[in-house]
């Protein structure tokens, strides 16, 4: 009987599966060679694909708008940083283009969308429910 083990990136939702690995530990060891990693994020350990790992290492200037978007309520609410922009773009691709519609989704429903992992889903809902003065500019 053959089985497959899948690991999902907690930021973007990308997956990697292997039928050759006999345990999650063996799969994690194999995907490290593909630039996947485990990282600490808000006191949690998450799995991160190589693409997200590269993007997270890019330095950013605190308190500065990125200059790569024209804003809008999703971008303004989710933050003008790498994760906020990546998340807003994934939501727009999924047809979620306003905060009212976003507020109708649960974390589980958001994780089911292409390009959104558990960390991104929780980030969206945390930002959505944060007071406007607590949101990054």
Image: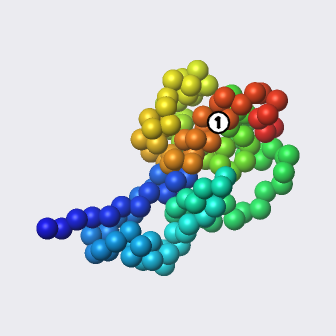
The image quadrant that residue 58 belongs to is: bottom right
Residue 50 in sight here: no
**Residue 60 at x, y percent in the picture:** 79, 57
Horizontal side of 16 relative to 94 (left or right) equals left
In the depicted structure, whether residue 21 falls above or below residue 80: below
Residue at point 53%, 72% (across, down): 35
Q: Position of residue 11 (x, y in %)?
A: 55, 52
The picture places residue 128, in percent across and down from the top left corner, at 65, 30
Quadrant location of the C terminus? top right
Which residue does the numbered mark 1 point to in the structure image? 126
Q: Classify mark 1: residues with Cα within 10 Å, few (<14), some (14-19) or many (20+).
A: some
Say which of 77 and 28 sits in front: 28
Q: How many marks?
A: 1
Image check: 19 left or right of 67? left
Secondary element type, mark 1:
helix
Dividing the picture into quadrants, the one containing residue 70 is: top right
Q: Residue at x 32, y 64 (%)?
A: 5
């Amino acid at each position: 009987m053959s089985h497959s083990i899948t690991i999902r990136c907690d930021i973007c939702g990308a997956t990697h599966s292997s039928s050759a690995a006999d345990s999650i530990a063996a799969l994690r060891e194999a995907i490290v060679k593909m630039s996947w990693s485990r990282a600490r994020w808000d006191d949690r350990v998450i799995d991160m694909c190589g693409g997200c790992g590269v993007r997270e290492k890019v330095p950013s200037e605190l308190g500065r708008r990125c200059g790569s978007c024209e804003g809008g309520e999703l971008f303004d609410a989710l933050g003008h940083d790498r994760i906020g922009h990546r998340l807003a773009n994934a939501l727009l691709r999924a047809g979620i283009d306003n905060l009212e519609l976003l507020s109708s989704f649960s974390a589980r429903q958001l994780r089911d969308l292409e390009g959104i992992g558990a960390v991104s889903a929780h980030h969206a809902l945390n930002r959505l429910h944060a007071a406007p003065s607590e949101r990054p500019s």
